[in-house]
Image (spheres, rainbow, N blue to C red):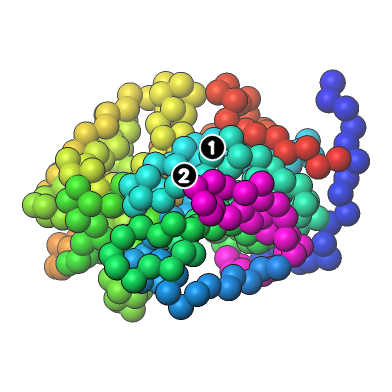
Amino acid sequence: MREERVMVQKKDIDWQSLGFAYQPTDYSYVSNYKDGAWDEGGLTPDHTVTLSECAGLLHYCQEVFEGLKAYTTKDGRVVCFRPDQNAHRMHDSAKRIVMPPFPEDRFVEAVDEVVRANAAWVPPFGTGATLYIRPLMFATGNVIGVKPADEYQFRILVTPVGAYYKGGVKPVKVQVSEYDRAAPHGTGNIKAGLNYAMSLYPSVLAHKAGYADNMFLDPQTRTYVEESGGANFLFVDKEGTLVVPKSATNSILPSITRRSLVDVAEHYLGMKVVQRQVRFDEIGNFVECGMCGTAAVISPVGEVDNGDEKIVYGMDHVGPVMKKLRETLTGIQSGEIEDKFGWVHEIKVD
């Protein structure tokens, strides 16, 4: 039997009323890169950043980031989900834009350290809230000519956020954007701020038009489905196969949630999974559509609009496959379903 745990005294917060917004916590984590090496790093109560006006971040956009969550399981443990995968993806992102990768083992250790220091901010089980963890890295060294900087900072901020779906999981509408979020063989496959900057204007337009997000098509031919502004797409065909879009131009971000849902589909639910390029003109043949990512796990898509063309999956209910996928993955994360793969990473806070 698991030993009884001493409960951390939580902050006096109305956890059910939290939105998805930043509020400072007790500590952040900071490490600096200078003279070819990362320093030992550590916690800081200072949540501000001071930069030179000539910092490389401000001129040539050398910045990458990650997003994951810490939460309380049913049996009272504080855990996060697959932080090693976030460490690896950030390593790849940093290399792509010529930044010195933060060591992957130290990344996980830093996540542990900052969550442990802010354990009172980890929402209790059953509230639907979580502690959002945002690792980021950016160029602090002075640069005038177009070249990589020689100094960088790695930080982790944490902030409590509310449940993504306050009124229950409901299908959303998306539209096909006339814009592209990434270039063919560009940086679409890394988690860099510059990619999200590209999606901001079309995102504002979509929201003004009443859509939850955009569906971006491949930037080379505008034939294939790629991703939304902040999530990957999933489809289910009439035979119950999970169909996962792939990119011929390497311009889709490799979502950790998507990868996990593929394994859930195959190894927990016994589904067939096909990962391939998905033509936009075939999505009307599918019976379910969803967007997957850290924040919502799965956002069911009820309708996709492309001008006057409307592909409708159903706005009045969540499809059975998307519902089961989401329930299974969240059940693994909360400790209510057996973790067959060792995905759930416990953070000792006692």
- What residue sits 37% from the left and 45% below the top? 95
The quarter in which the C terminus is drawn is top right
Query: Would residue 135 appear left or right of 221 to someone viewing this image?
Result: right
Quick check: 76 above or below 214?
above
- Residue name at image x 8 percent, y 52 percent: 221
Point out residue 113 in the picture as x, y percentages from the top left corner.
72, 46
User: From the viewer's perspective, is 208 left or right of 121?
Assistant: left
Residue 130 appears anywhere in the view: no
In front of the other: label 2 or label 1?
2
- Pinpoint residue 279: horizontal percent, then vertical percent: 14, 44
Looking at this view, name the residue that lies furthest to the left: 221
Rendering coords of residue 43 (x, y %):
72, 55
Instruction: State whether residue 339 is above or below residue 150.
Output: above
In front here: 151 or 212?
151
| Residue beneath disc 1 | 104
* CB within 8 Å, label 2 to label 1: yes
